[in-house]
Image (cartoon, coloured by chain):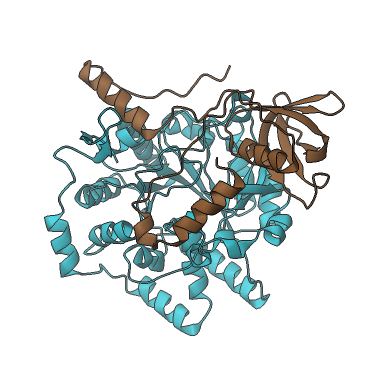
Amino acid sequence: MAVPVSQAWTVASYVLKQKIKGRKRYPLVLMLEPLFRCNLACAGCGKIQYPAHILKSDLSPEECFRAVEECGAPMVSIPGGEPLLHPKMPEIVAGLVARNKYVYMCTNALLLKEKLHLFKPSKYLSFSVHVDGEREHHDFSVCREGGYDIAMEGIRAAVAAGFRVTTNTTLFDGADPNSVRRHFDQLMAAGVESMMVSPGYTYDKAPDQNHFLGKAKSRRLFRAILSNRKKTWQFNTHPLFSEFLMGKRNFECTPWGMPTFSIFGWQKPCYLLQDGYADTFQELMETTEWENYGAKSGNPRCANCMVHSGHEASAVDYNFSSLKGFLVTASKYMFPSTYPDPDAQKLLNEWKPEHATPLVQIQSSASDNELQTVSGD
Amino acid sequence: MATEQQEHLKIEQLRQHSADEIETIAGREKENLEGWIPSLATDTEIREALEKAFDYRGDITITLKDGAKVEGYLFDRRSGSSLKDSFARVLPTNDRTKVNVAYSDIAALAFSGRDAAAGKTFEAWVKKYWEKKAAGEKNIQIEPEKLD
């Protein structure tokens, strides 16, 4: 895993403190959503579908700081919307860095190059750029031709200016593992510190309910992508979460591991499901019926979720829950595996895209039985 | 969004399938609620209408029994044992202060605002994309709506 030693130490000591205090539920990353508006209108995103007065609302820096202090998590992820549209984002980021929080500012990077000068490189700050695949995959996914080139330009500019830059890739049904692997090569060549990859999910508010990956397809896809990996690839996901995606181990969801705060308050129960809001973090933790969430609960809305926000925290918790967990994880960090797997290589070699041209096959609304081949994932 | 009973039946139906089988089950159906004025004659109708309002991606207008109106985005609801201790939580159109409205104070409800999710499906994007591609357009994109 490619994160600074200081960050790994901060997280490890934080988790150990929670364990010593006997806290059963503790947050690892605060998902801080200071705004919902965006300069993209991706067809797969339900985060931006609000009336104009909601899209125009921002969390103030003070509201952000209060949430961060209430929550206490050592890491803060700032998704949105597009955080760079927030007029006080530099102030928010500076305030979080001053509080020694490790900040991942999630951005589509359309504005990154022109706004870089408003930020200061720090070991606490990483721009987490959302790039959903190679050029045509990404452009189709974000519903904007040319988006990939601008994002990559932003990445290169941020790297050149001395910032930590990571990436986040979300995969949907129809993704081509060979293309994803080429995409990883391109990202590493651009100088990113590390990459994150996760399957998309059919959360209730997502406009697209038909192109997300179920568990069986996810495992097959991620086994093809992440086995036989190149040594040059650096990931900032927990190694055991990576194994979870590849179907090598199972984790239950830890929905409180990455709580979400927005203008509505603390979202119940997680980043993707919206079952209500609490006014304080304590209220969120005490009043959410956590037992109703996660695959084990039998809640069908959770049945196919493998998203990092619910499962990576489980991998981290596993490290610190037993000596075995600790030793397994330590060995993964000290002796990182490339996960050699001849069957996965065969899978990769024989992978047939579902169609002649990239990337997704959907049922045409115009013709009930005719399948239409389209570009995108 | 389905009513509570429809939702319950759907969940019960889904429970009969394994996680991998659910992969092939169609996604949730979306109701066209824009402009709807539900009947609030019974407690059940009130609760169901507010559940739908919670799922709605547009503004609603609540008329209180004293004649006052609350217009805004219903971002949360808290269901208690009676209508008196059940609350709709609204972010008004012109204010950031959250307003709590007891279900028992509600005289009428209207799905008055435009549904911000209407027509924005992946399929709609794909259709538009191919139409534009066929017409020889370059730099095809969906632009975010203007907010002013």
Picture quarter with the N terminus of chain A: bottom left
**Front residue of A185 and A213:** A213
Look at the image and tell me in which quarter the C terminus of chain A lies: top left
Residue at point 25%, 57% (across, down): A225
Query: Which is nearer the eye, A257 or A153?
Result: A257
Against A60, is A192 above or below? Answer: below
Q: In the figure, the brown chain has which letter?
A: B
Q: Which chain is cyan?
A: A
Q: Position of residue A8 (x, y in %)?
A: 49, 65
Q: Is residue A77 above or below residue A234?
A: above
Asked if residue A123 can be seen in this view, the reply is no
**Residue furthest bottom in the image:** A323
Query: Residue at position x 25%, y 30% from top?
Result: A367
Q: Position of residue A127 (x, y in %)?
A: 46, 44
Horizontal placement of A297 versus B47: left or right?
left
- Give the vertical position of B2 relative to B92 (above or below): below
Place of residue A146 in the rendered image (x, y in percent of width and height, measured from the top left)? 30, 28
Q: Is residue B88 left or right of residue A308?
A: right
Q: Position of A54 compared to A374: left or right?
A: right
Query: Of all residues shown, which one is farthest toward the front?
Result: B41
Q: Which residue is nearer to you in this view: B89 or A233?
A: B89
Residue nearest the observer in this picture, B33 or A105 = B33
Total number of numbered discs in the rendering: 0
Does the image show residue A371?
Answer: yes
Question: Percent x, y for residue B91?
Answer: 71, 33
The residue drawn where x is 46% and y is 79% is A325
Tell me the residue at 42%/74% (across/down). A329
